[in-house]
Amino acid sequence: MNHKLIDLTYLILDIQAIGSNLDNGYPLEIGWSLWKPGVEQKEFLTNLQSFLIKLPDSLTIPRQVQKITGIKEVDLKQGMELSKVYELLSQQFLSVYKMNQSICPLIIHYARYEKPFLDGMCQLYSEQKLFEPLIICTHKLSKILFPDLPRKGIRAVAGYLGYTTEQMRRSQHHIEATQYIWQKILIILKDQWQIAAMDELLDWQSTAMKNKKNNPTQRSYPMLAKGALNLPDQSGIYRMLRSNGDLLYIGKARSLKQRVSSYFLKSSHHPEYKLEMLSQAVQLDYTITPTAAEAALLESDEIKKYQPPYNRALLAGERKICYFSHDYQNRSSHFDDHFPLGPLPDETIIQSLTALERVVKSKNPDRIIEENYTILFQMLPEYLPDLELMKEGYQLFYQNYQDQLTQLPFFLAAKIIANAYYRSKLTERKNKPEQKIETDEEKEEKKEFIWTAEAVQKGFIHLLNSAFFYLRRAHWFKMLYHSLIIWENFSKDAINILPIEDGYIKGSTQDYKGQDLDELCKIHWLNRSIHNQTKGVVFEFDIATYDRLRILTTEIRRIIGENRKVEVFFSPSKIIKGERLKIFLEWL
């Protein structure tokens, strides 16, 4: 019987698992739903079922899988046995088989992944196979229908067709996306290929896949077809969007035209997540800024505000600003006289520092055990050296810095050790010849890191260096919190003026050169609603403010590197510029 595609009831399936089959992995979650063309999406969702699966005692969920699915081992404690879930799924197979009169079309986006699990469960739990579902892989169909699309994964295809898939890779989300893809494919098959029956679809797919092997396709991007590259050659931020208007990505550019065009050059090598994003990006929006520095600052603020799914950097995440007391023992979320050390983007680096203080004061390397030595290096246990090697490395560290650690208060000794180390790294960097940038392949070919006592010792020094690096940076950010930055433009015929008040940009202007900078500063300073000095100012930092000032610092460093003059005014009489500013920034 040649079943009409529009008349069939479909079973849509998704499996989330560790490994690729039952021999090297195990399902974490299995979900399915019935769908019939023409049924409202709301009705479709009511029959969606999803089950977490109990893991065998010998298996654990890899950290990366936990990250992308959000499934933790504690969640699976109340899960179902795999055999029971397969029994329910088999009943659903049979029900759909009867509904369609001897056919069970099973829609999976990437059937190559799910099928080994289905086969394995069938072998384990079925005494006899009454029939086999007819698997339709929307990934294979996408390769035929959208051959030039850079990526054909479920997020890429669903997004290209105008659907937003949730970030967490859960069965429910993938079932909803697969249903949407299949619904759109049915329309395309009917309207563009005049395919209306299952036999026609299977014959067409078989022929198309054979022809595809002999006709390799070239990558093309949906955005190019929309003429989205007609951009100005000016600085600003750009926003990539799906066809449904969802924001995918925010980027900054010195030249919007050049930056966005660079995505589509043949020589461009993008990571997988960027290709997935570019497969969906159809629309482009942008905002022009007076300078590249302001573009970088606006990018950071908008990423915090809108949380685009393909921006990995500058997201707030779980970071929270904190301050510490003079003795580093107590913390607060707000700055005052009792908690002056900060702002810091998290508390872990100070926790590591105070843990090391306790070990040093105990004069006993075994104290590392009591301190839970994972805190010292802020690493998961599987990445740390064994305890004996940790103790050996600590003793080496203590012996080399014994004079400072025994004769001075710990935090003063720690600062001296950290600063001496950082000074040596700066000297080494200046004397080192410029090296070529490594490719990803070259980085991967590097030897695996091996812990030694010397490496552990270096880890303790890095701990101190990181702590005082963040404290130096915090002091600088408090200075920048109320400031005025003046720098030359590229042609050096004008001056850009950027006022910072309460950590925010308060408008920017441009003046032609020829004026005295000190006088220029005084004029702008007096026109601002700002304190004449920062003494007594309450600093209201959040992660957005912290990142904004961090990026501003990077931009100042970049401008100096381009041999353009920069002056930073903290008051009309307190200025840092020239070589002094350059050296100052080297420590940040």
Image: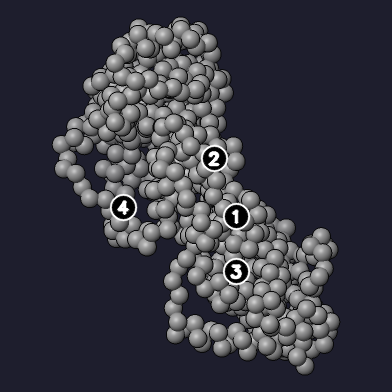
Q: Marks 2 and 1, Cα distance to the nearest angstrom?
A: 17 Å
Q: Say which label, 2 or 4, has the lower sequence index.
A: 2
Q: Which residue is mark 2?
A: 303
Rendered-image quadrant of the C terminus: top left
| Label 3 Cα neighbours within 10 Å, binned few <14 / some 14-19 / many ≥20 | many
Secondary structure, mark 1, is: loop
The mark that comes first in sequence, 3 or 4, is 3
- Asked if 442 appears above or below 296 in the picture, the reply is below
Q: Marks 2 and 4, how far apart in space?
A: 37 Å
Return the residue at label 4.
450
- State which tag comes first along the sequence, 2 or 1: 1
Q: Quick one: label 3 or label 1, which is nearer the N terminus?
A: 3
* The N terminus, quarter of image: bottom right
Q: Identify the residue shown where x is 62% and y is 71%.
A: 109
Distance of mark 4 from mark 1, alpha carbons? 45 Å
Location of mark 3 (residue): 26
Task: Describe residue 462's horizontal placement relative to residue 337 as left or right.
Answer: left
Q: Mark 1 = which residue?
A: 242
